[in-house]
């Protein structure tokens, strides 16, 4: 199904605590900051996808993160890449 939709799927290694921890933390953040804050239930998957896309844009480009010195992930990537 993913291939037919041209969605790339990434597998994690089985029983790898570090990978599982990162993914579980991501799920928790998504729940607390996105799903639990949706004011009205989306009527269609496309609406949910668009809301999530906007949340990810905010999360990566505007929301400051304590764990990375109150910068955004986009700022950290720019520093590493040298932009």
Image: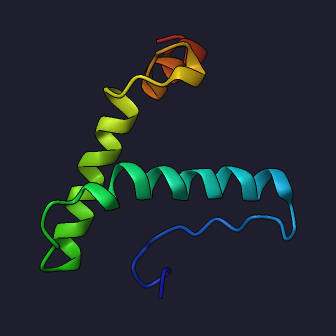
Q: Name the image quarter holding residue 47.
A: bottom left
Q: Name the image quarter holding residue 57.
A: top left
Image position of 29 (left or right of 68): left
Farthest residue in the bottom direction? 1
Q: Indicate the position of residue 77 as horizontal and vertical percent values.
A: 53, 23
Residue 12, placed above or below residue 57: below
Q: Indicate the position of residue 11 as horizontal and vertical percent values.
A: 70, 68
Q: Residue at x 46, y 16 (%)?
A: 71
Residue 41, placed above or below residue 22: below
Residue 8, placed above or below residue 70: below
Q: Indicate the position of residue 38 as horizontal and vertical percent values.
A: 21, 60
Image position of 10 (left or right of 59): right
Image position of 3 (left or right of 34): right
Nearer the observer, 60 or 3: 60
Q: Indicate the position of residue 68 as horizontal and vertical percent values.
A: 57, 20
Label count reads: 0
Q: Residue at x 55, y 52 (%)?
A: 26
Residue 36, placed above or below residue 77: below
Q: Residue at x 59, y 24 (%)?
A: 67
Colouring: rainbow
Q: Residue at x 48, y 80 (%)?
A: 2
């Amino acid at each position: 199904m993913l291939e037919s939709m041209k969605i790339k799927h990434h597998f994690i290694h089985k029983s790898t605590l570090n990978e599982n921890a990162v993914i579980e933390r991501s799920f928790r953040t998504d729940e607390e900051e996105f799903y639990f804050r949706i004011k009205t239930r989306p009527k269609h998957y496309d609406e949910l996808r668009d809301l999530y896309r906007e949340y990810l844009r905010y999360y990566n480009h505007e929301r400051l993160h304590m764990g990375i010195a109150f910068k955004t992930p986009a700022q950290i990537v720019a520093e590493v890449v040298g932009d």
